[in-house]
Image (cartoon, helix red, strand yellow):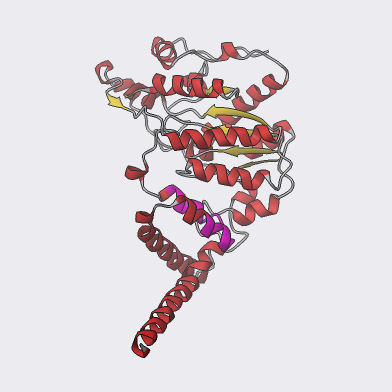
Amino acid sequence: MHSFKRTLWKMLAFVLLVILVTEVITEPYFQNEIFHYQDATVRDSFAGTLDVLICGSSHAYRGISPQMLDEKLGCCSYNLSTSLMTMTGRYEMLKRELDRNPVNLVILDVSYNSMTRDRDKEGPEGDLYQLGRYTNLLERMSYFFRHFRLNEYGSAYYDTLNRGVTAWRKLLNGEGKRGSSDKYQTKGWQPAPSDFYPIVSIVKEESFHTKALNTQFNAQDVEYMRKMVELCKERDIAVIVVAVPITQYMTLMYSGMDEIYEGCCSLFQEWEVPFYDFNLYRGKTKLFPDETAYYDINHLSESGAWAFTAELITLLEALKAGTDTTAWFYTSYSEAEQAALGGYDQPVTKE
């Protein structure tokens, strides 16, 4: 019996030691701004002032500039998006900021894969970033135990330790301390250079739409998108959903875009929330050319983000004025493709 008790005490001591060592290694990571997605103290600095929020994944993260929204609309906005942000992560972050800010408009981002993602194939990467956006241990642990799968615990522990080691190294070199993030200026937006070199002009027509997208919506993702919409409606906050443009090259190479678009239209119509897909925006290929407007096949570059945010502002101003914007968009990807390939994809004159 005494031997058994001693073993239990030794095991408990070992567990406590592991926890202590883990905290020493990892806490500097969570309390500072080591990686681009870490913005907890940035958001704290704006708490109580934000009236417009953008919430989405990397498309909005790269594509929507709060600085321009603030300047042109006279608002105080913040981009909550980040890379691979899951729908659960979006909901949790949106709710947190709605609870402490006088928000009157929420812009939700939806992309071709927002509601078709497969956790089995993708893994927990997006939620690992989410953990890095909490400085509060209890909030972090709450998110972890509610949204991580049991078989992901090991990889999450390893990833966090690795980021902790990186944090110590950077902090010792004078990097990554609180106050160092560019997001105090960009307000959550992460601009990117123009690195995409399109080959649309040399792609043969027989190669069009030869790569298939997953068009099966994930029930959990759909539910969390609905919960975000309802969260805004319950608080009498205006909400719109936008699809940030992707390269024309991608829309030509992949099949399934229209099926995904129709599925989104059906959901947002059912939920009575407006949806605007800027891949169907008339003049898209002129306003956001593949040659300069994109960082990669999926994401806008800095110049593309400025151009897109300007058009988004035009839309928001038109909606506020009660303007019918239906004619500003094509009705399908097929129609938009025909216009682009035919050379008559021109911006609509907006008066």
Location of the N terminus by quadrant is bottom left
Foreground: 138 or 303?
Answer: 138
Residue placed furthest toward the front: 1
Instruction: Write the residue at 74% across / 48% down.
Output: 48
Image position, residue 30 (x, y; %): 53, 62
Question: Can the viewer see residue 237 in this picture?
Answer: yes
Location of the C terminus by quadrant is top right
Horizontal side of 257 relative to 107 (left or right) equals: left
Image position, residue 273 (x, y; %): 60, 24
257 in relation to 18, above or below: above
Q: Is residue 135 magenta?
A: yes
Horizontal side of 209 relative to 165 (left or right) equals: left
Instruction: Write the residue at 51% across / 17% down.
Output: 283
168 in relation to 289, above or below: below
Image position, residue 343 (x, y; %): 43, 11
Horizontal side of 238 relative to 141 (left or right) equals: right
Instruction: Write the residue at 48% across / 69% down.
Output: 168
Foreground: 346 or 91?
Answer: 91
Number of dots carrying numbers: 0
115 in relation to 289, above or below: below
Residue placed furthest toward the bottom: 2
Quadrant of res 334: top left
Chief secondary structure of the magenta portion: helix
Quadrant of res 4: bottom left
Question: Can the viewer see residue 187 in this picture?
Answer: no
Q: Is residue 205 magenta?
A: no
Image position, residue 327 (x, y; %): 57, 11
Residue bounds of the magenta highlight: 126-142
Foreground: 106 or 201?
Answer: 106
